[in-house]
Image (spheres, rainbow, N blue to C red):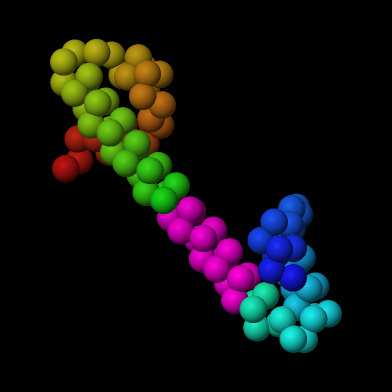
């Protein structure tokens, strides 16, 4: 049972674990604990991704501000940094 859960490959791990838990009463608690661990890992990865995206956005905004202050035109800055018009307007609202 442990091997199947640890090494198994499925497109929907949550459904797989719930099906195993329903059919194996003796292992239900273990399987659900593993499912909870997988859920937490997914949440942590998502949190890391969001943090990285926020960091990249802040860096792009800092660079864009420096580019504008040095005289580069707005359209080029938007092209190079990937910032939107709204984000560009927010650069100097501080």
Placement of the C terminus among the 4 image quadrants:
top left
Q: Say which of 37 and 52 sits in front.
A: 37
Taking the spot 49% from the left edge, 53% from the top edge, the residue there is 46
Q: Report if residue 40 lies within the magenta region.
A: yes
Residue 44 spot, x, y in % from top left: 46, 58
Q: Main secondary structure of the magenta part?
A: helix
Above or below, 70 against 83 in this view is: above
Q: Say which of 7 and 16 sits in front.
A: 7
Taking the spot 27% from the left edge, 25% from the top edge, the residue there is 64
Residue 62 spot, x, y in % from top left: 23, 31
Q: State the image quarter where residue 29 is shown.
A: bottom right
Q: Say which of 82 and 19 sits in front.
A: 19
Residue 72 spot, x, y in % from top left: 24, 13
- Side of 1 relative to 76 (left or right): right
- Side of 14 relative to 72 (left or right): right
Above or below, 19 against 5 in this view is: below
- Side of 18 relative to 23 (left or right): left
Above or below, 47 against 79 in this view is: below
Taking the spot 28% from the left edge, 33% from the top edge, the residue there is 59
What span is in magenta? 33-47
Q: State the image quarter where residue 25 is shown.
A: bottom right
Residue 80 spot, x, y in % from top left: 37, 18
């Amino acid at each position: 049972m442990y091997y199947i859960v640890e090494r198994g490959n499925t497109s929907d791990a949550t459904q797989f674990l719930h099906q195993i838990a329903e059919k194996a009463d003796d292992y239900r608690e273990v399987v659900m604990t593993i499912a909870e661990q997988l859920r937490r890992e997914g949440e942590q990865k998502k949190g890391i991704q969001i943090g990285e995206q926020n960091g990249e956005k802040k860096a792009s905004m800092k660079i864009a501000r420096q580019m504008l202050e040095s005289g580069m035109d707005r359209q080029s800055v938007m092209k190079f940094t990937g910032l939107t018009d709204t984000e560009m307007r927010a650069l100097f609202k501080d």
